[in-house]
Image: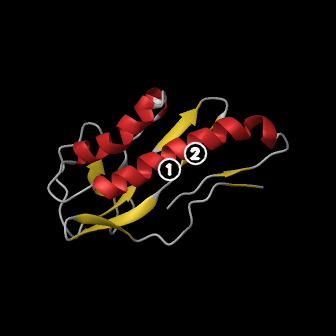
Amino acid sequence: FSRTLCLGKNLKAVSYQLSAIYNIVLEAQLVAIERIESGMTATEADKLARSIIKQAGYGDNFGHGLGHGVGLTIHELPTLSATSSDLLSDSMVFTIEPGIYLTGYGGVRIEDVVTLEKGRAKVLTRSGKDSFQL
């Protein structure tokens, strides 16, 4: 799983934009987790988060897929992306990890591992999602 933290001396200068981006990514992730269900394609799942990021004006800054399967290796099927035809089904374990990345500035990614259980996503990761700075 991934979390984002902010390091540096001039945090006040970047805090507003990074905080706004963090909130967009968090909303995209939470909506995807809430709405993903068994039987949908991985492309449909990807679109749940991607549409929120795009509506916020950062569509070009989400350059990877929403997630990937986790099993014997770290990147397995299903591949949750804008072009995947993988079908989601109960007992699959995969990540939900939307992100926004600004070249020369920084980025935010929030990743959790979920499983599909009784048609819905169940979060397996046990880590907070509050933004924080050091």
Q: Which mark is residue 63?
A: none
Is the C terminus in the top left, top right, bottom left or bottom right quadrant?
bottom right
Q: Residues within 10 Å of mark 1 (few under 14, many from 20)?
A: many
Residue 83, image x, y percentages: 25, 37
Left or right side of 3 for 58: left
Tell me whether the residue at label 1 lies in contact with that at label 2, contact meaning CB atoms closer than 8 angstroms.
yes
Residue 17, image x, y percentages: 66, 35
Give whichever of 84, 50 is nearer the camera. Answer: 50
Give whichever of 67, 129 is nearer the camera. Answer: 129
| Residue 68 is at least partly visible in this image | no
Residue depicted at 59% across the width and 31% down the height: 102
How far is disc 1 from disc 2 in space, using C-alphas? 6 Å
Q: Residue most toward the right?
A: 9
Left or right side of 20 for 81: left
Residue depicted at 28% across the width and 50% down the height: 79
Give whichever of 113, 49 is nearer the camera. Answer: 49
Q: Secondary structure at mark 2?
A: helix
Residue depicted at 43% across the width and 51% down the height: 29
Left or right side of 11 for 108: left
Amino acid, disc 1: Leu
Give whichever of 19, 77 is nearer the camera. Answer: 19
Residue under label 2, please give it: 22
For residue 30, what is the image quadrant? Answer: bottom left
In the displayed structure, 116 sits above or below 34; it is below
Residue 51, image x, y percentages: 36, 35
Q: Secondary structure at mark 1?
A: helix
For residue 93, what is the image quadrant? Answer: bottom left
Amino acid, disc 2: Tyr
Q: Residues within 10 Å of mark 2 (few under 14, many from 20)?
A: many
Residue 121, image x, y percentages: 30, 64
Q: Which mark is residue 26?
A: 1
